[in-house]
């Protein structure tokens, strides 16, 4: 198992920004867990600095395009996209594709494409929450389905409406951090 210094160097090397090791070490020395240090890194200016190439290409922006793509993909397919897929879908959205257009393609790529929305709901929620949903977690979404929300609308609504999961999806030199 890596000590804190080794962990900090590994994270920084994966991001291609050796100076970030100091930020991670500072967070750990301040009492943060490794998980919290990664969340803080992903949410902070350092991650944006480390992904300057993606920023310049329009793949990471203040509108949250990259995060929206990662959320939709994870909800529909149950895992993070590969670096190539993440770049492809984020580029498409940056070029004007809507979340709904991506949702169509993600659901078509999954084994869930022919499922009824009511059967799809618990699977999507499990992907989004990271655990099987409780009845209380299912209820508000089931009500939206009863009011006429279809499968595609459900996927987009879940991506926008679930609590923030702090997924760190950063692609740097072919490495996807999630």
Image (spheres, rainbow, N blue to C red):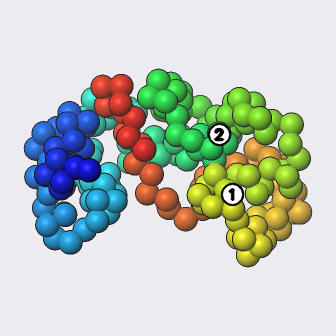
Q: Is residue 36 visible?
A: yes
Mark 1 or 2, nearer chain start: 2
In this rendering, position of residue 10 left or right of residue 62: left
Give me the residue at 49% from left, 30% from top: 82
In this rendering, position of residue 112 left or right of residue 172: right
Q: Position of residue 47 (x, y in %)?
A: 26, 46
Whether 164 is drawn above or below 97: the answer is below
Identify residue for label 2.
77
Whether 124 is drawn above or below 14: the answer is below
Few, some or many C-alpha atoms within 10 Å of disc 1 (few <14, some 14-19, many ≥20)? Answer: many
In this rendering, position of residue 171 left or right of residue 51: right
Give me the residue at 70% from left, 52% from top: 124
Q: Position of residue 15 (x, y in %)?
A: 25, 37
Identify residue for label 1.
125
Q: Quadrant of the C terminus?
A: top left
Q: Position of residue 107 (x, y in %)?
A: 73, 36
């Amino acid at each position: 198992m890596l000590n804190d210094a080794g962990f900090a160097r590994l994270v920084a090397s994966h991001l291609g920004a050796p100076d970030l090791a100091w930020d991670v070490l500072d967070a750990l020395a301040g009492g943060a867990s490794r998980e919290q240090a990664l969340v803080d890194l992903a949410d902070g200016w350092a991650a944006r600095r480390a992904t300057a190439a993606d920023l310049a290409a329009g793949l990471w922006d203040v509108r949250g395009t990259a995060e929206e793509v990662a959320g939709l993909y994870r909800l529909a397919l149950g895992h993070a996209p590969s670096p190539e897929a993440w770049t492809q879908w984020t580029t498409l959205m940056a070029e004007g594709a809507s979340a709904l257009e991506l949702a169509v393609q993600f659901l078509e790529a999954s084994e869930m494409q022919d499922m009824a929305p009511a059967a799809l709901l618990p699977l999507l929620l499990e992907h989004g929450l990271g655990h099987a949903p409780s009845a209380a977690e299912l209820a508000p979404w089931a009500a939206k389905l009863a009011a006429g929300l279809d499968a595609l609308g459900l996927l987009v609504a879940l991506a926008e409406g679930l609590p923030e999961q702090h997924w760190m999806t950063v692609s740097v030199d072919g490495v996807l951090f999630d």
